Image (spheres, rainbow, N blue to C red):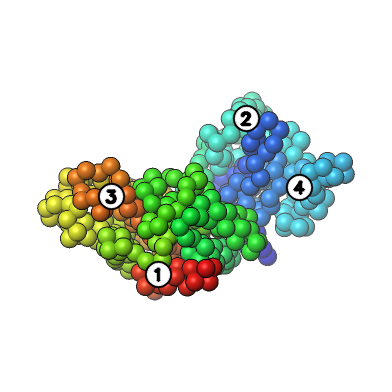
């Protein structure tokens, strides 16, 4: 049984327990400009349950009445079409889909809105994410309205359309062994790419050259590409949190912040490293780097089952603030700095997010208003940073324009945690060695 069938089986168990059906469409193809499209990527929910990457597909799940195993998985997809396949590529087709994907039935996508009312007749609760695709929403709600019209014939109409959040996304939050294998592989490719970048960066190289090297390294190892737009930020560009222009020249003495991760079978990695373009940290760069590193290691260290998710951020924040005070960038006690938000001049983002098929993965962070406890199988990033605005006149000049973030991908295990991206150089000595060895290599 494929990992996708296992996911589907687990979701069908939830649907049986809650007596709900589900309608899970994939993404729509997106226009880039005129008649050119972006490369297609399936919707993460749909991929999780099918492992099927063709556009124009919808999965329908109908729960068993007596037992979970009686649940039905029905896929609507494109039919084979010789002429279209010559232009746009091969299609799985309706005949082969049930066996290839382990489904109960497959139907042509053109029949979706004709067949769906029959499949969903009598289902009172339907899991469907509205608000994502206006056109699909319109058809879906028209179909629900049609089902209400059958009430006179004794077929009970739907009374609730439910968000996948508490059901499907809770499953996605706890990674299956197959998913973890994908994430480990994404992490291995990302390791290669970050090491290659440290090897290649030197004064005079442009950020886009490093960006291209990262993407080349991802793709040549079979990755679908970057899991998100790579940030390749030299010098003060690192202080722009979502800098993706990546078009500036790297200069002697600057740091280079790279936030880039490979996607493997649509599973993300998400890693940041910051290193000196010329191979050695300056004293102020090193001082700030050591603070961020200490904060990151301390935050990773608290990760284990049962610990409230917010403790990861609080631990990083405390260590960052202590460091800012030690270096004279903030004044007062830790509590005073945090109370007055003075640290936000230097650290203005969160420390963690879930990671999986989406880089900011699905899954609730709180339960009943409380930060939820970590559990085995969850994967989260730990990514503290310090960013000194180049125009910040309140600090000594030597700090200005330095931006540092360090980010790893951490799996919660039964015993504690495992750093999936631990192989990427991170200490000052490791990073300098990786840069210098590479500089000698390319000189
Ligand atoms: N690269 C996106 C993030 O770190 O959240
Ligand atoms: Mn991240
Ligand atoms: Mn990142």
Residue receiving disc 3: 400
User: Residue at left 75%, top 49%?
Assistant: 105
Q: CA distance from mark 1 to mark 3?
A: 22 Å
- Alpha carbon distance from label 3 to label 4: 60 Å
Q: Residue at image x 28%, y 49%? A: 400
Per the model, the C-alpha gap separating discs 1 and 2 is 53 Å
Q: Position of residue 160 (x, y in %)?
A: 52, 36
Asked if residue 146 shows in the view, the reply is yes
Residue 432's disc is 1
**How far is disc 1 from disc 4 in space, using C-alphas?**
56 Å
Q: Is label 2 in a helix, a strand or a loop?
A: helix
Mark 1 or 4 closer to N-term? 4
Q: Earlier in the sequence, mark 3 or mark 4?
A: 4
> Can you tell me whether the CB of the residue at mark 1 lies under 8 Å from the nearest atom of ligand 3?
no
Q: Quadrant of the N terminus?
A: bottom right
Disc 3 versus disc 4: nearer the observer:
3
């Amino acid at each position: 049984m494929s990992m996708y069938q296992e996911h589907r089986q687990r979701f069908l168990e939830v649907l049986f327990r809650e007596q709900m059906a589900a309608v899970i469409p994939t993404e729509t193809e997106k226009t880039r400009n005129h008649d050119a499209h972006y490369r297609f990527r399936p919707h993460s929910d749909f991929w999780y349950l099918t492992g099927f990457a063709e556009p124009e597909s919808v999965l329908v799940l109908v729960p068993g009445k007596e037992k979970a195993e009686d649940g039905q998985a029905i896929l609507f997809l494109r039919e084979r079409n010789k002429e279209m396949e010559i232009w746009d590529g091969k299609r799985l087709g309706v005949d082969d889909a049930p066996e290839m994907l382990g489904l109960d039935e497959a139907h042509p996508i053109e029949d979706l809105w004709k067949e769906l009312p029959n499949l969903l007749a009598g289902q009172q609760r339907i899991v469907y994410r509205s608000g994502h695709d206006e056109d699909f929403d319109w058809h879906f709600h028209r179909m629900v309205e049609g089902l209400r019209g059958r009430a006179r014939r004794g077929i009970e109409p739907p009374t609730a359309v439910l968000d996948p959040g508490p059901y499907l996304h809770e499953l996605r939050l706890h990674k299956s062994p197959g998913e973890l294998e994908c994430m480990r592989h994404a992490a291995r490719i990302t390791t290669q790419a970050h090491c290659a970048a440290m090897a290649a960066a030197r004064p005079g190289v442009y950020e886009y050259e490093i960006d291209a090297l990262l993407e080349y390294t991802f793709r040549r190892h079979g990755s679908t590409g970057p899991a998100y737009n790579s940030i390749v930020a030299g010098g003060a560009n690192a202080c722009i949190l979502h800098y993706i222009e990546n078009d500036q020249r790297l200069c002697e003495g600057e740091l280079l912040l790279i936030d880039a991760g490979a996607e493997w079978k649509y599973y993300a990695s998400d890693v940041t490293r910051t290193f000196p373009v010329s191979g050695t940290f300056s004293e102020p760069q090193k001082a700030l780097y050591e603070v961020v590193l200490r904060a990151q290691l301390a935050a990773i260290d608290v990760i284990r089952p049962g610990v409230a998710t917010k403790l990861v951020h609080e631990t990083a924040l405390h260590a960052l603030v202590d460091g800012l005070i030690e270096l004279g960038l903030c004044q007062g006690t830790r509590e005073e700095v945090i109370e007055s938000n003075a640290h936000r001049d230097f650290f203005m983002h969160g420390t963690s997010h879930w990671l999986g098929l989406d880089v900011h993965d699905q899954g609730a962070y709180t339960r009943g208003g409380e930060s939820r406890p970590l559990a085995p199988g969850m994967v989260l990033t730990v990514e503290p940073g310090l960013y000194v605005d180049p125009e910040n006149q309140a600090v000594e000049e030597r700090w200005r324009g330095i931006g540092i973030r360090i980010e790893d991908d951490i799996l919660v295990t039964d015993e504690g945690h495992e750093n999936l991206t631990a192989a990427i150089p991170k200490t000052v000595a490791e990073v300098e060695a990786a840069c210098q060895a590479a500089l000698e290599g390319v000189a």
